[in-house]
Image (spheres, helix red, strand yellow):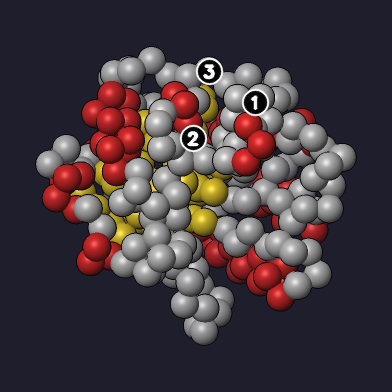
Amino acid sequence: MGRATAPGRTAAKGGLRIAAWNVNSVKARLPNLLDWLDSFTPEVALLQEIKCPAEDFPRLEIEDRGYNLAVAGQKSYNGVAILSKTPLEVARDRLPGDEGDDQARYLEAVTGSGRTVVRVASLYLPNGNPVGSDKFAYKLAWMDRLLAHARTLLALDEAVVLGGDYNIAPADGDVYDPEGWRDDALCRPESRGRFRALLHLGYVDAWRARHAEVGAFTYWDYQQGRWNRDEGLRIDHLLLNAYAADRLGGCEIDRGPRGKPKASDHTPVWCELGDAGW
């Protein structure tokens, strides 16, 4: 099972810690988010499901903690953000491939400094349920667009990290009840196949690269005591291109925030990149 990180853990000298977290409403979870930023102090935080337009994002509270911000927001739904200790240069605020798609689900920026410059994307894939509906078709089409864009990013001579809530459990070992979830959009072969296609392009699942065990989760439903029973799914991922994967140090799931009062139903996953060779 993924280990919780120790509060206040510091990065290796010259390293870069990148975390992804679906906060499930940045306003509702702001105290928890600020506590986590204060204790864990990631260099880069990729947030999903912020559920507010950019102008309503709690910018001052986060900037007071030394973060630069980029936000692609949407009223009441979706929304992604990137927080970084170094300046951000936004590359895209929408996933290419469908000009009519106005859902705020993708944000890409370049950050870091010196030999730790990295291109990061915060992404929030569609849930896709119920299977057979337009929502499932949208999920698969969105994944096809992500695959096409991820392929273009491989041509760049730089480290790339695609992090966020993928709404896909890659394998049965990433689900507490594989049979019960067999026909859910998060576990359908069509969804898993597209996730595998990202790996076949050359991206590395950072957590799986450092962990062989099963039963480590990043999401626990609010209903039926799922958290207390540890009945969850691993659906939040950090995918690294070869330049980033070559620098991969540790990668862990921080279970601490999920146990807080008024917690998000997700918890952060993070990795650390060294700077050798950059």
Q: Nearer the viewer, residue 168 or 179?
A: 179
Q: Secondary structure at mark 3?
A: loop
Is tag 1's residue or tag 3's residue first in the polypeptide sequence?
A: 3
Residue furthest bottom as drawn:
100
Label ID, residue 3: 3
Residue 272 placement (x, y as % from top left): 42, 28
Q: Can the viewer see residue 185 in this picture?
A: yes
Q: Which image quarter: residue 36?
A: top left
Q: Nearer the viewer, residue 14 or 216?
A: 216
Residue 55 placement (x, y as % from top left): 23, 66
Q: Can the viewer see residue 80 in this picture?
A: no
Residue at 28% in and 65% down = 54
* Quadrant occupied by the N terminus: top right
Residue at 84% in and 53% down = 183
Q: Secondary structure at mark 2?
A: loop
Label ID, residue 230: 1
Q: Amino acid at mark 2?
A: Thr
Callout 2–callout 1 Cβ contact below 8 Å: no
Between the residue at mark 2 and the residue at mark 1, the CA separation in whole angstroms equals 13 Å
Between the residue at mark 3 and the residue at mark 2, the CA separation in whole angstroms equals 12 Å
Residue 39 placement (x, y as % from top left): 28, 24
Q: Is residue 178 left or right of residue 201?
A: right
Is tag 3's residue or tag 2's residue first in the polypeptide sequence?
A: 3
Label ID, residue 267: 2
